[in-house]
Image (tube, helix red, strand yellow):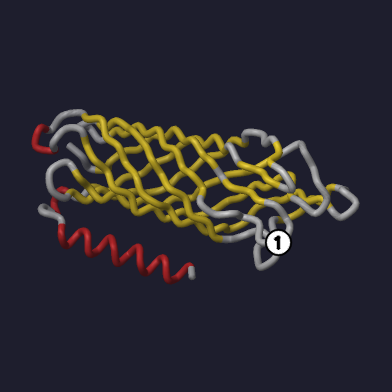
Amino acid sequence: MKQLFTVFFCTVIFSSASKAQDLTNILFGIKAGYNLNLSSFITTKKVPSNPVHGGYAGVMMKIPFDNRLSFAPHVDFNYRGAETDSIHPSNYSSVKEFQMRIMPLLQIDFKHPDEKANTLFVHFGPSVEFGLKGKQVIQDASNNKQSGDLRYGYQRYGRYDASWHTGIGYETTGGFRLLLDYAHGLGNMINTEGGGTIKYRTVSLGVGYWLGRK
């Protein structure tokens, strides 16, 4: 499945680049930022969750289309987590995870590129996420906490997730980029039957830089 998404992502990038009006305007950049994870926990009922601090770092592209629209794919490594003080037998109370994200986003600039001016922008689109490793705290049948490495698989924690991103940002003519992003997790990460539900809601604040921009 991971290989399939990677092939799909590369195909989209190359086909988008071939349709771009001016290939010399394609930008490559780096980015990093802070995450505030506001997860949703449900066991037999919705339980309160604690905010978890995280972050991300990665690379990005900007492929211009007509007018103010660009295809803006990103790939990054992301640290996220979910936590609650309300423990229940056979349910997670804490998950901390390191993952890779593939994000085929669209970006709309408020100003046309021909103006060569600083501009606000919005972006939106999905991300596909692959869990790499992490830590977990899960209660046994007697409600005793058991800590250890995050265990992926059927009837365990899910390795794959997807989110929808909506963000607003600011770019300068010198290449600096500031972004406020909201990611709404679409999947339940708990594969265990009767094991409850964990879904991620993440607010991020990040910076980026387009390399070689003049």
Q: Quick check: 147 left or right of 185?
A: right
Q: Quick check: 96 left or right of 62?
A: right
In terms of image quadrants, where is residue 108?
top left
- Residue at left offset 66%, top offset 56%: 190
Judging depth in this view, the residue of 165 and 179 nearest the camera is 165
- Residue at left offset 32%, top offset 64%: 10
Judging depth in this view, the residue of 167 and 174 nearest the camera is 167
Quarter of the picture containing the C terminus is top left
- Residue at left offset 34%, top offset 44%: 124
- Residue at left offset 37%, top offset 37%: 167
**Residue 84 location (% of width, % of height):** 72, 39
Q: Quick check: 170 left or right of 182?
A: left
Question: Extreme front residue here?
Answer: 45
How many numbered circles does the render carry? 1
**Residue 15 location (% of width, % of height):** 22, 64
Q: Which residue is mark 1?
A: 192
Q: Quick check: 179 left or right of 153?
A: left
Looking at the rendered structure, the secondary structure element under dot 1 is loop
**Residue 80 location (% of width, % of height):** 58, 44
Label 1: how many Cα within 10 Å (few below 14, some 14–19, many 20+): some
Question: Extreme right residue here?
Answer: 142
**Residue 76 location (% of width, % of height):** 44, 50
- Amino acid under label 1? Thr
